[in-house]
Amino acid sequence: MSFTNVVHVLVLLAVCDQVTADSINFYNVKPPVEATPFPKSFKCFTCERASDNYNCNRWAEDKWCPQDTQFCMTVHHFTSHAKTVFVAKRCAAVEQCLASGCRHHRDTGHTECVSCCEGMVCNVEVPTNGTNAVFAMRRQAYSSAPVRTWGSGRSTLLTTLGLGLTRLVLL
Ligand SMILES: *[C@@H]1O[C@H](CO)[C@@H](O)[C@H](O)[C@H]1NC(C)=O
């Protein structure tokens, strides 16, 4: 466990001491200030197969994302009664974020929703439906796309990225 992780855990424990464990506001859990490994570096909540969102965020690894990734991804599997089966979070490249959206798995009866966002530990929540299972990209990334008119630019970008079925949200 790196020093950063230790500090992060201590911060979380300090927070836990003050409030009941169920009321941690993960939006307020800011990573400690430290040198960034490279320009535009960021971190994501990262967990492999947590039992729910709380347990993912609470024990999530706090580490810099690899340079070939630009987004934070969240995968949420839940039953037809909206009960979480598992939550996975990781750093992701644009290609992986093309899977954003919800799919029903007929074999298990479970639904899988995938969302992607851009920014420091932005993947706090889990997607639960088509409204929030989106690929949320910052507008600067979009503004470098060739066509700048809102309507046609958006569809051009979607087509360029092969995002035909993915809902893209520009922040
Ligand atoms: C999607 O899920 C969010 C959060 O659970 C909820 O607030 C929203 O109403 C849902 N939207 C639809 C269309 O079901």
Image (cartoon, helix red, strand yellow):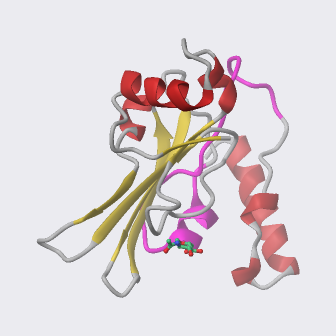
**What secondary structure is the magenta-colored segment mainly?**
loop
Question: Does residue 92 show up?
Answer: yes
Position of 74 compared to 169: left or right?
A: left
Q: Does 11 sit above or below residue 40?
A: below
Question: Does residue 66 show up?
Answer: no
Q: Residue at x 33, y 63 (%)?
A: 112
Q: Nearer the viewer, residue 4 or 23?
A: 23
Q: Residue at x 62, y 15 (%)?
A: 144
Q: Nearer the viewer, residue 36 or 131?
A: 131
Q: Residue at x 47, y 57 (%)?
A: 133
| Percent coordinates x, y for residue 42 in the rendering | 66, 33
Position of 96 compared to 42: left or right?
A: left
- 49 falls in the magenta region: yes
> Which residues are the magenta region?
34-61
Q: Does 59 sit above or below residue 97?
A: below
Q: Quadrant of the C terminus?
A: top right
- 39 falls in the magenta region: yes
Q: Quadrant of ligand 1?
A: bottom right
